[in-house]
């Protein structure tokens, strides 16, 4: 806008004149107009007074100090470990007189704040170690639980049955080793591995009775009593120390940490109905191996039936024989627990057989039941390896987690 | 001190804060006319300036700092325009109160007159459009040169001159509504 009588005198020129940012020519022009025109003079004087009022405004009182020591300290700490972000509106710089309320932080935001703090590399490394630890624990369960399913598909029992009638002299036939079984089915090598690290796997061998003409008998009588059965069951498991005793009654010696052990439990169950006498034997024999001398076999036995008499037990590095002669009625079951200690790795085939000879009510009749089973148990050190891995991973997780947590401070 | 702050010395930057916080708050308050908002803007501006020290390539540190303050004020003004709602806090604020310092050597009558004039003057400043208000505050209240104002507001020199002249004219005309408060120089 320009003044009408002096078109070259504009408001901008007057304002610039007040700020002394005009040329000499412009200054002369303005001063000449001021002298000549009172209106221009009033414009200049009023504008100058306005500027003067603004310049005389008192300074405003600060509501607080705006120093940012907290932000600076935080930046220094961040440079030391890692860059972290903080809110520009740090609560430390607010006075208590502010009426603004602190927003509530829910648990998810709290977790996010914790997760986003500290050294990111340490945090990620600790998370990876923790994940690996969880995987190791979970894999242990899968290894244990998976083996029974594998074993159930692999072990095939052997059945051998012989029977004979008694002679006129009703004597109890001594327990004999079974004849060559008619059916032999050996478990496959890859599927016969038995877990030696704690899980019990049961395989039941059921014997069916088939009568055969005795070689020496002159009389043959059919059995009128119910069909007796004998079963052999090998249950590999890791028995607790208290349940395994050596032959002399002292506490069993278990494998040292550098070795492993395989524990097989063989149970025989007989149900021959009313009997007058029964003799049973359990033989467990491991195949000769190059490390045979390093193996140690201990055995213990127990009977579940109150009617059974204690069995005599003999064990050696090759054969464990449990023999009992007892009069039973009903069902009796016996258990022989073998603890075989050996080197940390290797396989150990175990052959177990049981023969039960029972007599029916008539002394002339005698039937022999037998069952045989084989199992290959593997002695290995997988359990100890897994345990060491878990311990090391747990230690690494704790160390990394502690370092990350301290980096957040 | 600026060089030490740029090099990363933390206490040097705090000294800069103490030196420029009054001016920064004055500009922010007169831009926003809200003490709390102005305080937040100033705090935020200093934090931004601290973090952007690496980008400061020398020159006028005061202008560089004020540019951050001005931009932050514009952000707040844009946000206020978007909201365009009244809050309870605004209803409770005493708009007649101007947080000025007290001169203890002044007589009560003079103090009262001065306070009334100051309030009226602040009201007149608030009546200006934000762009004119900014250049007026920087030039006439804080004494920035035209070149500095152009750098702070990111404007051409001609635009700065025209806005300053229009702001002064408009402010003078607003003040003439209460001539009894004005000095004799305002009388024709």
Image (cartoon, coloured by chain):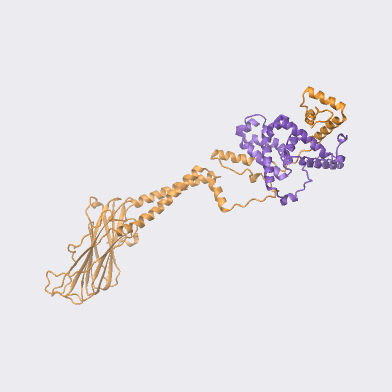
Position above or below: A6 against A280? above
The letter of the purple chain is: B
The x, y position of residue A343, in whole percent, is 29, 51
Instruction: Name the residue at the top extreme.
Output: A25
Q: Quadrant of the N terminus of chain B?
A: top right
Question: What residue is at 73 percent from the left and 32 percent from the top?
Answer: B160
Residue A67 visible in the displayed image: no
In front: A57, or A128? A57
Question: What residue is at 79 percent from the left and 35 percent from the top?
Answer: B168
Q: Dividing the picture into quarters, in which one does residue B42 lie? A: top right
Q: Quadrant of the C terminus of chain B?
A: top right
The x, y position of residue A65, in whole percent, is 69, 41
Image-based side of A68 in relation to A286, left or right: right
Colour used to depict chain A in the structure image: orange
Q: Dividing the picture into quarters, in which one does residue A78 lie? A: top right
Question: What residue is at 38 percent from the left and 55 percent from the top?
Answer: A141
Position above or below: A276 against A53? below
Q: How many marks?
A: 0
């Amino acid at each position: 806008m320009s003044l009408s009588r002096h078109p070259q005198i504009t408001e901008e020129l007057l304002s610039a004149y007040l700020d002394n940012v005009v040329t000499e020519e412009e200054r002369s022009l303005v001063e000449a107009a001021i002298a000549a025109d009172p209106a221009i003079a009033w414009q200049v004087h009023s504008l100058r007074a306005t500027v003067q009022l603004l310049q005389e405004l008192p300074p405003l009182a600060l509501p607080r100090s705006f120093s940012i020591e907290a932000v600076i300290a935080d930046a220094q700490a961040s440079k030391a470990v890692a860059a972290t972000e903080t809110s520009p509106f740090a609560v430390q710089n607010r006075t208590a007189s502010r009426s603004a309320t602190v927003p509530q932080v829910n648990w998810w935001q709290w977790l996010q704040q914790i997760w986003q703090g500290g050294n990111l590399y340490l945090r990620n490394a600790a998370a990876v170690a923790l994940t690996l630890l969880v995987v190791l624990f979970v894999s242990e369960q899968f290894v244990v639980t998976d083996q029974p399913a594998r074993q159930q598909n692999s072990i095939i029992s052997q059945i051998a049955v012989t029977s004979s009638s008694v002679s006129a002299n009703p004597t109890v036939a001594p327990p004999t080793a079974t004849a060559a079984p008619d059916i032999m089915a050996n478990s496959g090598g890859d599927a016969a591995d038995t877990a030696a690290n704690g899980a019990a796997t049961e395989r039941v061998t059921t014997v069916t009775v088939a009568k055969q003409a005795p070689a020496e008998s002159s009389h043959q009588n059919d059995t009128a009593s119910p069909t007796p059965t004998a079963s052999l069951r090998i249950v590999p498991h890791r028995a607790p120390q208290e349940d395994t005793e050596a032959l002399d009654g002292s506490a069993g010696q278990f494998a040292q940490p550098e070795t492993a052990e395989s524990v097989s439990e063989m149970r025989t169950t007989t149900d021959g109905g009313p009997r007058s006498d029964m003799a049973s034997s359990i033989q467990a024999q491991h195949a000769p191996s190059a490390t045979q001398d390093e193996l140690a076999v201990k055995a213990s036995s127990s009977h579940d039936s109150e009617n059974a008499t204690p069995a005599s037990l003999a064990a050696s590095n090759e054969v464990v024989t449990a023999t009992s002669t007892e009069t039973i009625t009903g069902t009796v079951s016996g258990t022989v627990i073998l603890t075989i200690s050996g080197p940390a790795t290797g396989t150990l085939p175990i052959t177990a057989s049981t023969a039960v000879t029972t007599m029916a009510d008539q002394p002339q009749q005698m039937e022999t039941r037998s069952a045989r089973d084989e199992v290959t148990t593997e002695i290995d050190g997988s359990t100890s390896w897994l345990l060491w891995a878990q311990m090391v991973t747990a230690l690494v997780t704790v160390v990394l987690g502690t370092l990350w947590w301290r980096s957040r401070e | 001190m600026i060089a030490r702050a740029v090099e990363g010395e933390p206490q040097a930057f705090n000294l800069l804060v103490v030196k420029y916080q009054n001016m920064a708050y004055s500009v922010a308050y007169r831009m926003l006319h809200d003490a709390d908002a102005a305080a937040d803007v100033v705090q935020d501006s200093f934090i931004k300036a601290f973090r952007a020290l690496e980008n400061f390539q020398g020159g006028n540190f005061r202008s560089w700092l004020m540019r951050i303050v001005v931009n932050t004020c514009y952000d707040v003004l844009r946000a206020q325009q978007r909201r365009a709602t009244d809050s309870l806090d605004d209803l409770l604020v005493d708009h007649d109160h101007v947080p000025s310092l007290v001169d203890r050597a002044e007589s009560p009558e003079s103090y009262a007159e001065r306070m009334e004039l100051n309030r009226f003057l602040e009201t007149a400043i608030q009546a200006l459009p934000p762009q004119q208000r900014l250049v007026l505050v920087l030039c006439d209240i804080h004494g920035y040169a035209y070149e500095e104002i152009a750098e702070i507001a990111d404007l051409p020199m001609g635009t700065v001159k025209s806005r300053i002249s229009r702001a002064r004219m408009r402010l003078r005309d607003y003040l003439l509504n209460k001539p009894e408060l004005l000095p004799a120089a305002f009388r024709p």
